[in-house]
Image: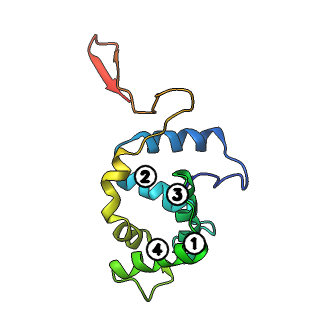
Amino acid sequence: SSGINAEYGGSVSFKEFLSFMIVYSSRDSEDKLKLIFNMYDVDKNGSLHVDEIRAMLKSMLELVSASVDSSELNSLITSLFIKVGFQSKTELSFEEFKILMAGYEKDLENASIAFAGGNTTVQPKTKSRKNGSGKSNVFT
């Protein structure tokens, strides 16, 4: 599937949930950006409209308990677009979205999922298993 909630319109399948957990627990910021892009590309047209970007930023700000009114959010979006020369755009392709988010790659790489009630974060694990020849295979 192309992202969370892509298959069932309104609910998340277990497969989508696992895909999200695997991608989000990686350190690859481009994979995380693609996941975020697909989550907020609500109409699945392969681009993010400024309204979809507004919804994304609002959600991200709510995650860190930041409250901004709609005019502040619009100002933030305008300044982000101007900073990368996209002031005349109303939609961004994934490549343009990567440019917009380029200054936040380290933040994305270090982002992890913490579960309430502890300091547990979801990170990829490496396991070792013997194959039939007695040699070890490493897989994640």
**Res. 60 mark:** 3
Tell me the residue that label 4 is attached to.
76
Report helix, strand or loop for mark 1. loop
Residue 42's place in the image compared with 128, above or below, is below
Q: Residue at 38% of width from left, 27% of height from top?
A: 125
Residue 118's place in the image compared with 79, above or below, is above
Please indicate, yes or no, whether residue 92 appears anywhere in the rendered image.
no
Report helix, strand or loop for mark 2. helix
* Mark 1 or mark 4, whichever is nearer to me: 4
Q: Earlier in the sequence, mark 1 or mark 2?
A: 2
* Mark 1 or mark 2, whichever is nearer to me: 2
Q: Residue at 57% of width from left, 61% of height from top?
A: 67
Q: In which quarter of the image is the C terminus?
A: top left
**Res. 45 mark:** 1
Tell me the residue that label 2 is attached to.
32
Q: Position of residue 31 (x, y in %)?
A: 40, 52
Q: Earlier in the sequence, mark 4 or mark 2?
A: 2
Q: Distance between the residues labelled 4 and 2?
A: 22 Å
